[in-house]
Amino acid sequence: MKANGVEKLRLVQDRGQVLVNRATVFNNHPLVVRANGVDVLAFENSSGTPKWHWNLLANGLNFVESNVADYRLFLEDGGDVGINTSNPTEELDVNGNARIRNLGTADENDDLIAADASGVLQRSKINYGGRWTNTNTSTDLNNDNTTAPIFGNEDYKDDGNNLYQVSGNSLIVRLSGRYDIRANLSLEGNNDSGNSDNRTNVNVRIAVNGTPVGAIGASGYIRFASGHEQSSIHVNEILELNANDVITIITYREANSGKVTFSGSGESSIMINKLR
């Protein structure tokens, strides 16, 4: 069938195929349409009002709500899908709000989903944490600017070394964000060389890149008499950290100079948890 001498419709007998607007044979598809410029196909309602049409724009297939808006749905060459955008940057790019009407119940191993600053969804590392306990019981903590050797045994560390990495007596945080840091130090006064190390007291602060931050943790002094040989200090801060910040626990002498160490292996701990 032709119009003004130009072919508009051809029925291909041996394939059961309809070719529209001089389209060429393509595989065994029942209908093959060649675009007229950029326009491909239009849909009207029962009264003849155009409602939807397809055209080839911006290197993709554009689903148009006729006379209302382009790119209601856009299939870009290469496979990315855009909704209300002609420039999808992900496999699915929604320029607007998204809704999922039915979701299954999560189990304990499921991931949280978060959006980055550009709105791209990704696995969230919120609630990813780690916990370590001490093995060192010999370092004297009753000296100013002593880095506490608290990273002895690793209890758990989420995401391998991608988020947290221990280096000696420090913890490197690989991603920027807000973190909850808690340290529990169990201390013991030592009787060195027969001398009674009485009335000692250690103070503690969390440090970022070697700079103490937040509150000073302190306890009652170790009297080292009548069985009073131990004390404990507990510090915690919620800190905004940058990628590759280094976390340490710094101790200070606050009273007499006697030796004070961790009370026993595994009796002191440090924990970190990502909040956002």
Image (cartoon, rainbow, N blue to C red):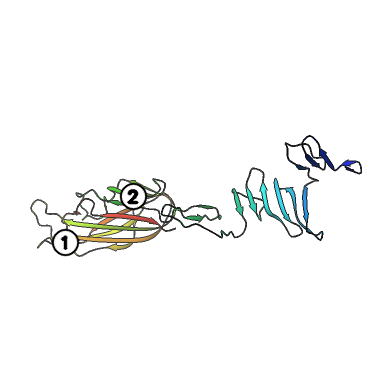
Residue at x 59%, y 48% (from the top left corner): 91
Q: In which quadrant of the rendered view does residue 220 lie? A: bottom left
Question: How many numbered dots are placed on residues in this image?
Answer: 2
Q: In which quadrant of the rendered view does residue 94 lie? A: bottom right
Q: Which residue is mark 2?
A: 156
- Left or right, residue 157 beside residue 39: left
| Percent of width and height locating residue 262 | 21, 53
Mark 2 closeness class: few <14, some 14–19, many ≥20 residues within 10 Å: few
Query: 199 or 269: which is nearer to us?
Result: 269
Question: Which part of the image, by quadrant, shows the C terminus?
Answer: bottom left
Question: Which part of the image, by quadrant, shows the N terminus?
Answer: top right
Specify the amino acid type for callout 2: Tyr
In space, the residues marked 1 and 2 are separated at their CA atoms by 32 Å
- Please, what secondary structure does the residue beneath circle 1 have? loop
The furthest residue to the left: 194
Q: Which residue is mark 1?
A: 222
Query: 27 or 172: which is nearer to us?
Result: 27
- Left or right, residue 143 beside residue 68: left
| Percent of width and height locating residue 236 | 32, 61
- Left or right, residue 202 beside residue 38: left
Give the mark, 1 or 2, whose residue is nearer the N terminus.
2
